[in-house]
């Protein structure tokens, strides 16, 4: 239908308004849009996507990048310039000096307009392997310029930066599926089609420094388990509509199935309560959901303020919001692909193919809309033309209340490389009246490679006088500088050592323990020890500590065991020693491994909690069987003691780490008694890591249960019984009284509701289930990732926790013939 008709079909929050910005033929099949410094809107048009039910012309060069302009200032785009034409399946774009980074035909290109006519004159290949996959739903995208001046991507392990007149590529953490954004402090937000909102709680590339450790917290943190959505029309044209429970009794989608493009809103063009919210697109449900971010120290969570309805939804089946951005006017802009068929051909089920043809959703194609969402009294404003701003004006704009202006000014200042702005930037970095401006000034100086040592340390010398995130960013940058300057490193070590007793802020404590990885061992040890004193119970701090101990894990283990505060047993301390021992065993240094054996000889793990933690950590590394065995001169004596034999500890996994003369091949307890394959043993070991950081707080480190928290898992028929029921508990949660081994548990003896863990991926859930089904006295078959995936699909639409009696009656309704 026409834009005039379509706009009448929106239902939108009462305090918002929506206006048309552009429509076909100015834009066709848009998948991404972004404003440049002069208020022009660049649009990626994927015109080759699914023009018939099989997507037969997908590889034809019919895509393009267009630049839209509003020449009369009425808020409606009226001219379009084709910047780049005849390209294959373009999917991402970032405006840069003199042109744009463009992703097309699976590759990343640097394009430039040399004569100012808004048409690309050059096209230089940066990365031929950018996309990683030729499937549009699973290829790299994003090109978000982060606060730290790197370009980050979704569905990708790489980031990019312009340095020394060339584009460089570097590995980073894998993030999300389609779309990526950042908050005022540079934290990265992304999602997956099945899980609406995730964030990294730590800055990029810290938690992946230590190859000997696999983190279970801080990265890919699920902000909400609430997957419920509220469409206002029937949604029959979805891929799994054949599964009972996916749609409600009005044939409306009940939960996210194609969540994408999470956008953290940092502007003032909506009512003030929307600032700091994250909007998530659901094109299959023809809607956008709003999420309010809740901060609790370093932890973040989210909920939807719009109870029982969507922020924006349409009765139009062809409204397909696939990307969001903001503009110089502070409003929210929606990229609407506007089409019937949104699923790529590789994943179309027989059900969807049939209903798409019946409902005539394949044609027409080459439509597209850009919508503006604003507060009620929005009025068109002249475009700002930041390209004409002087250097001092751009520096002043780093304090603008809107994130769009700050990000754009930071980019332009770095690209201009004007040394006359340096005094102004340094002055702003020290001005405590505007903390956000301080942070942008610091990272602008970093991008210019003109950070000043004395300026940084003037910010760091008195933590109590700085806003915490200003201090955190100054500390990150001082650490970065210390890697190339011994003088700065020594000065930083002295400052940190002096402030160890004053760490009361969690953000600062986390950054200090991360920065410890760049300090000398003595200062690093003291810093980690001091921070862990009050944070050892938080998994993110344990992971941060080990990320800072690359190749120093063994020395730190010995250091810890000598500390008076580490003599008494607590579960968090035992978990941390186990994590350290696993990392040491993965490193597999013969001298260190021999010394661990000697330590276990002196302190039998069947009698000493520290030795037990070390033994268990080593066994978990042995279960993964990724290292060559270390040769010992003789068999470890503690293995033959009566106390150890009677302890029932799993020694075979530990034995995998070593060989010795006359070693007997023992029956592998996991492999033979529990019938686990080598791959399933590795899953067991990974599952233990996640169990300790995610589950043990409620169920106990030994599965014994915790009073007022959760029932026991050891000898639980719910754990060792039906794997489908068990997976459903983790995917959706559980509420109400439950009987375990003949004992009834109910509130207040346990929490009334076990929350869903659906934000964890299928593999992680399978690992946890495999672990708890084969640890302690439990013996049951392993759970596969594919099994969890099938159960997730077959129970899609369940947005409330299960009750035990419901689980006992449930029958899986998957129809294999329609399974995509």
Image (cartoon, helix red, strand yellow):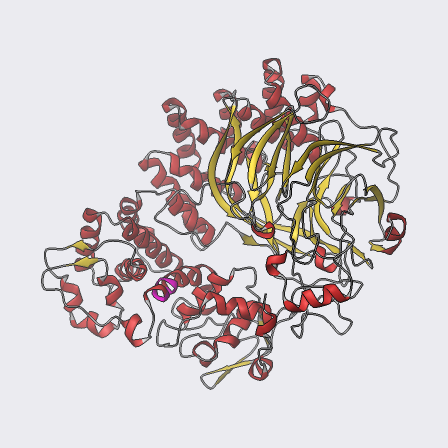
Which sits in the foreground, 60 or 157? 60
Q: Position of residue 559 (x, y in %)?
A: 28, 46
Report if residue 683 lies within the magenta region: yes
705 is higher (above) or lower (below) than 10: below
Q: Position of residue 812 (x, y in %)?
A: 57, 78
Which sits in the foreground, 808 or 402? 808
Q: Quadrant of residue 692?
A: bottom left
- Quick check: can you spot residue 799? no
Q: Where is residue 805 in the image (x, y as percent from the top left)?
A: 59, 83
232 is higher (above) or lower (below) than 329: below
In this image, 368 relative to 344: left or right?
A: right
3 is higher (above) or lower (below) than 635: above
At x 85%, y 44%, the residue is: 19
Q: What stretch is highlighted in magenta?
A: 680-684
Q: In which quarter of the image is residue 21?
A: top right
Which sits in the foreground, 140 or 160? 140
- Of the 4 image quadrants, the one containing the C terminus is bottom right
Report if residue 311 lies within the magenta region: no
In this image, 447 relative to 326: left or right?
A: left
Q: Main secondary structure of the magenta part?
A: helix
Q: Residue furthest bottom?
A: 742
At x 64%, y 70%, the residue is: 798
């Amino acid at each position: 239908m026409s834009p005039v008709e379509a706009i009448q079909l929106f239902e939108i929050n009462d305090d918002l308004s929506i206006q048309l910005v552009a429509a076909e033929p100015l834009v066709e099949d848009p998948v991404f849009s972004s404003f440049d410094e002069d208020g022009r809107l660049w649009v990626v048009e994927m015109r080759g996507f699914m023009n018939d039910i099989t997507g037969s012309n997908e590889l034809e060069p019919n895509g393009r990048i267009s630049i839209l302009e509003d020449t009369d200032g009425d808020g409606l785009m009226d001219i379009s310039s084709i910047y780049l034409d005849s390209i294959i399946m373009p999917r991402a774009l970032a405006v840069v000096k003199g042109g744009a980074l463009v992703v097309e035909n699976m590759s990343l290109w640097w394009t430039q307009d040399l004569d100012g006519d808004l048409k690309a004159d050059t096209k230089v290949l940066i990365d031929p392997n950018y996309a990683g996959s030729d499937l549009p739903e699973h290829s790299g995208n994003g090109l978000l310029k982060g606060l730290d001046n790197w370009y980050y991507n979704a569905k990708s392990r790489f980031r990019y930066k312009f340095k020394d007149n060339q584009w460089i590529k570097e590995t980073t953490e894998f993030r999300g599926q389609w779309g990526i954004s950042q908050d005022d402090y540079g934290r990265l937000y992304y999602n997956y089609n099945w899980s609406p909102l995730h964030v990294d709680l730590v800055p990029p590339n810290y938690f992946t420094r230590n190859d000997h450790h696999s983190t279970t917290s801080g990265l890919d943190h699920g902000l909400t388990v609430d997957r419920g959505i509220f469409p206002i029309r029937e949604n029959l044209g979805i891929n799994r509509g054949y599964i009972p429970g996916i749609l409600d009794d009005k044939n409306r989608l009940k939960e996210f199935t194609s969540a994408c493009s999470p956008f953290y809103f940092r502007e003032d063009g909506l009512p003030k309560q929307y600032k700091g919210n994250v909007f998530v697109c659901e094109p299959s449900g023809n809607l956008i959901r709003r999420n309010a971010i809740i901060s609790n120290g370093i932890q973040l969570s989210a909920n939807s303020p719009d109870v029982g309805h969507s922020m924006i939804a349409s009765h139009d089946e062809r409204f397909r919001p696939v990307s969001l951005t903001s503009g110089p006017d502070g409003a929210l802009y929606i990229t609407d692909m506007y089409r019937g068929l949104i699923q790529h051909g590789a994943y179309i089920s027989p059900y969807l193919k049939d209903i798409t043809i019946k409902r005539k959703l394949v044609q027409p194609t080459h439509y597209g809309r850009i919508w503006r969402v604003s507060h009620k009294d929005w009025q068109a404003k002249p475009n700002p033309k930041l390209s004409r701003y002087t250097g001092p004006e751009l520096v002043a704009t780093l304090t603008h209340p809107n994130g769009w202006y700050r990000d754009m000014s930071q980019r332009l200042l770095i690209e201009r490389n004007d040394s006359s702005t340096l005094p102004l930037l340094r002055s702003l970095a020290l001005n405590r009246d505007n903390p956000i401006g301080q942070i942008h000034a610091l990272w602008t100086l970093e991008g210019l490679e003109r950070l000043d040592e004395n300026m940084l340390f003037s910010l760091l010398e008195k933590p109590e006088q700085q806003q915490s995130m200003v201090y955190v960013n100054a500390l990150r940058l001082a650490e970065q500088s210390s890697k190339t300057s011994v003088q700065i490193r020594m000065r930083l070590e002295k400052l940190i050592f002096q402030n160890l007793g004053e760490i009361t802020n969690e953000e600062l404590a986390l950054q200090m323990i991360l920065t410890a990885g760049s300090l000398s061992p003595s200062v690093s040890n003291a810093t980690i020890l001091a921070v862990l004193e009050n944070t050892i119970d938080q998994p993110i701090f344990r992971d941060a500590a080990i990320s800072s101990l690359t190749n120093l894990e063994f020395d730190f283990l010995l250091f810890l065991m000598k500390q008076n505060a580490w003599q008494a047993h607590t579960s968090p301390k035992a978990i941390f020693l186990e994590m350290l021992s696993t990392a040491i065993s993965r490193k597999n240094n013969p001298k260190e491994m021999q010394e661990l054996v000697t330590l276990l000889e002196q302190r039998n793990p069947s009698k000493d909690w520290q030795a037990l933690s070390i033994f268990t950590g080593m066994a978990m590394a042995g279960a993964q069987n990724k290292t060559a065995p270390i040769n010992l001169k003789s068999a470890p004596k503690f293995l033959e003691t009566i106390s150890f034999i009677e302890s029932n500890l799993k020694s075979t996994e530990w034995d995998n780490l070593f060989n010795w003369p006359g070693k007997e091949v023992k029956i592998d307890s996991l492999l033979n008694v529990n019938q686990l394959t080598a791959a399933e043993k590795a899953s067991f070991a990974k599952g233990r890591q996640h169990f300790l950081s995610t589950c043990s707080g409620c169920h106990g480190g030994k599965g014994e249960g915790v009073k007022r928290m959760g029932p026991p898992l050891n000898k639980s028929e719910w754990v060792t019984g039906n794997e489908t029921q068990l997976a459903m508990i983790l995917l959706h949660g559980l509420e109400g009284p439950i009987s375990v081994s003949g004992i009834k548990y109910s509130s207040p003896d346990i929490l009334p509701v076990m929350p869903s863990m659906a934000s964890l991926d299928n593999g992680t859930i399978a690992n946890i289930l495999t672990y708890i089904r084969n640890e302690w006295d439990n013996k049951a078959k392993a759970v596969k990732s594919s099994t969890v995936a099938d159960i997730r699909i077959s129970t899609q639409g369940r947005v409330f926790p299960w009750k035990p009696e419901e689980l006992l009656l449930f029958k899986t309704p998957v129809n294999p013939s329609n399974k995509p």
